[in-house]
């Protein structure tokens, strides 16, 4: 797959994206356009299925509407709400620490800069890029395991880990596609281009894909 193909590939992925269930972080953004809620949902979604994240954030946002609301919950109360998510103990610690960092470093507001987002508890490069792209519609490429795996399967990049994939995509992928690559590829990976037994017979971009390792 080359850049002569990528516009058509993204068009097909967009059509697929809107035909299937929307990933939870995009759904939060569409419903609220609130960077704080996008940030919290993104932190909670790590190592957790979207269905579980959706249930947890629906319960959490009944009692948490702004960062300072985390101060009103005890560690035990917060953990009871989010315990179904992966690594819930660590996430509880991160979310309890979040209000203090936001107040002291960013006047209580979620920042949009990648380096600033990385200062927040529980935020790595994947989360920072996703929040920047989804919550603020600013140029960023969020590379999770789906994007890393699938872009290499396509033959579009040849990299060994998500960080290498992010840098390779920054160098190669036209910027007009940066904001949507994660959302479209995650939906594609969850529904068709699965790690094992990808549904190549149903794939809308089959003719563009090198099927590396398939």
Image (spheres, grey):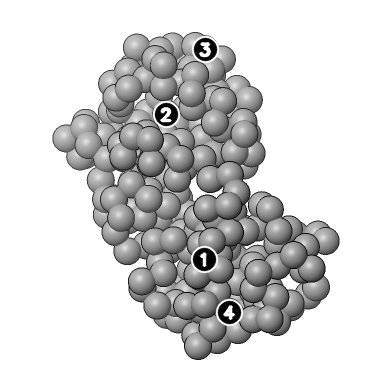
Q: Which residue occupies 58% across, 80% down?
A: 156
**Does dot 3 land on a helix, a strand or a loop?**
helix
Q: Viewer-proximal residue, 114 or 202?
A: 202
Q: Which residue lies most toward the left here?
A: 107
C-alpha separation, residue under disc 1 versus residue under disc 3: 34 Å
**How dense is the environment of label 1, judged by Cα within 10 Å: few (below 14), some, or many (20 and up)?**
some
Residue 41: where, in percent of width, then height? 46, 36
Q: Please report whichever mark, 2 or 4, sits nearer to the chain's N-terminal start.
A: 2
Q: Please report whichever mark, 1 or 3, sits nearer to the chain's N-terminal start.
A: 3
Q: Name the residue under label 1.
A: 163
C-alpha separation, residue under disc 3 versus residue under disc 2: 12 Å
**Label 3 close to label 2 by CB (< 8 Å):** no
Q: Mark 3 points at which residue?
A: 76
Q: Which dot, 2 or 4, sits closer to the camera?
A: 4
Q: Name the residue under label 4.
A: 157
C-alpha separation, residue under disc 2 versus residue under disc 4: 35 Å
The image quarter containing residue 101 is top left
Q: Please report whichever mark, 3 or 2, sits nearer to the chain's N-terminal start.
A: 3
Please indicate whether residue 201 sits to the left or right of residue 144 in the image: right
Q: Which dot, 4 or 3, sits closer to the camera?
A: 4
Residue 150: where, in percent of width, then height? 64, 67
C-alpha separation, residue under disc 4 versus residue under disc 3: 44 Å
Q: Name the residue under label 2.
A: 95
**Does dot 1 land on a helix, a strand or a loop?**
helix
Please indicate whether residue 105 sits to the left or right of residue 44 in the image: left
Residue 106: where, in percent of width, then height? 20, 39
Q: Please report whichever mark, 1 or 4, sits nearer to the chain's N-terminal start.
A: 4
């Amino acid at each position: 797959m080359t850049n002569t193909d990528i516009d058509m590939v993204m068009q097909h992925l967009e059509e697929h994206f809107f035909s299937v269930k929307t990933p939870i972080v995009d759904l939060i953004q569409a419903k609220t356009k609130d960077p704080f809620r996008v940030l919290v949902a993104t932190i909670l979604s790590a190592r957790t299925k979207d269905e579980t994240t959706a249930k947890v954030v629906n319960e959490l946002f009944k009692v948490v509407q702004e960062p300072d609301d985390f101060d009103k919950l005890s560690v035990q109360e917060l953990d009871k709400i989010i315990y179904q998510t992966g690594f819930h103990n660590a996430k509880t610690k991160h979310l309890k620490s979040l209000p203090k960092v936001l107040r002291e470093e960013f006047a209580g507001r979620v920042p949009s800069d990648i380096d600033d987002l990385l200062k927040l508890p529980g935020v790595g490069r994947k989360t920072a890029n996703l929040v920047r792209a989804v919550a603020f519609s600013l140029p960023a490429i969020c590379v999770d395991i789906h994007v890393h795996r699938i872009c290499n399967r396509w033959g579009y990049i040849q990299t060994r880990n998500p960080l290498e994939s992010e840098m390779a995509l920054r160098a190669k992928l036209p910027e007009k596609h940066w904001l949507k690559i994660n959302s479209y590829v995650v939906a594609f990976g969850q529904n068709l281009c699965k790690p094992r037994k990808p549904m190549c017979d149903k794939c809308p971009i089959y003719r563009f894909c090198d099927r590396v390792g398939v």
